Image (cartoon, coloured by chain):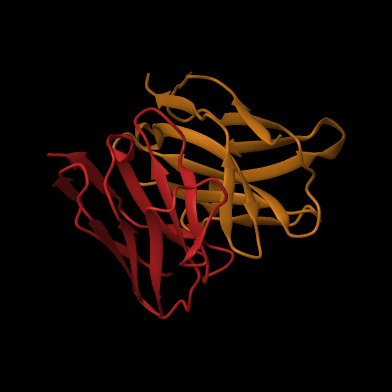
Chain colours: A red, B orange
Amino acid sequence: DVQMTQSPSSLSASVGDKVTITCQASQHISKALNWYQQKPGKSPKLLIHDASTLEAGVPSRFSGGGSGTDFVLTIDSLQPEDIARYYCQQYDDIPLPTFGGGTRVEIK
Amino acid sequence: QVTLKEAGPALVKPTQTLTLTCTFSGFSLTSGVCLSWIRQPPGKAPEWLARIDWDADEYYSKSLKTRLTISKDSSKNQVVFTMTNMDPGDTATYYCAREIMVSGKFDSWGPGVLVAVSS
């Protein structure tokens, strides 16, 4: 099974800061990687699919990159509404998708 | 507009069977579109559990396979999920989600149902 490791597990940043979250796969998964945002008490929301394609309606300050085993989610200018947990999810190992452990983003 | 909603008990006793129903609208389970169940224990990451595709083929988590069943009723736009022999460790919010297979993405989720397992 493909294991997904996210870092950091939590971070605190100021409004306007650039924030970077990394996700590492235990084996090569090409670009089969999606990112989700989950606000407290809500369902996860798809932000990015196929490592770097922004889902419709997602603000352009979010971007994704990487391929193979190393991936990154970037928030260019952190906004108060971005406070949430972020999860990566691989789908290379179909039919068994797996999620990373998550990163909690807080405002400093 | 795509919507999904889970229905089921908020509390089950250990050893009981959990049955959840997902009712969806705004789409059909056609080629490349599946319906998955995903759970999330409090404070933890989501865990994929099961999938049913447009041909009613079923897929299950390796570690939980012996306890899970998924089925669909296309006439009602519903997918039913069962998990047997519930344990307190199965306490979680259970979600159904639409899965688009070409990108392996879960692009629409229900609000979830929190299921506690306790005697």
Q: Position of residue A78 (x, y in %)?
A: 26, 46
The extreme left residue here reads A108
Q: Is residue B45 left or right of residue A12?
A: right
Indicate the quadrant where residue B14 lies.
top left
Which residue is located at x 69 percent, y 52 percent? B34
- Give the number of marks: 0
Q: Does residue B104 sit above or below A15 in this rendering? A: below
Which residue is located at x 39 percent, y 32 percent? B91
Q: Quadrant of the N terminus of chain B?
A: top right
Q: Nearer the viewer, residue B8 or B117?
A: B8
Which residue is located at x 76 percent, y 36 percent? B26
Q: Position of residue A77 (x, y in %)?
A: 27, 50
Q: Does residue B21 sit above or below A14 in this rendering? A: above
Residue B85 in sight here: no
Q: Position of residue A64 (x, y in %)?
A: 40, 64
Which residue is located at x 81 percent, y 53 percent? B30
Residue B64 in sight here: yes
Q: Quadrant of the C terminus of chain B?
A: top left
The extreme right residue here reads B75
Q: Is residue B87 left or right of residue B109?
A: left
Q: Is residue B60 left or right of residue B80?
A: left
Q: Nearer the viewer, residue A48 or A30?
A: A48
Indicate the quadrant where residue B115 lies.
top left
Q: Nearer the viewer, residue A18 or A47?
A: A18
Q: Position of residue A44 (x, y in %)?
A: 45, 41
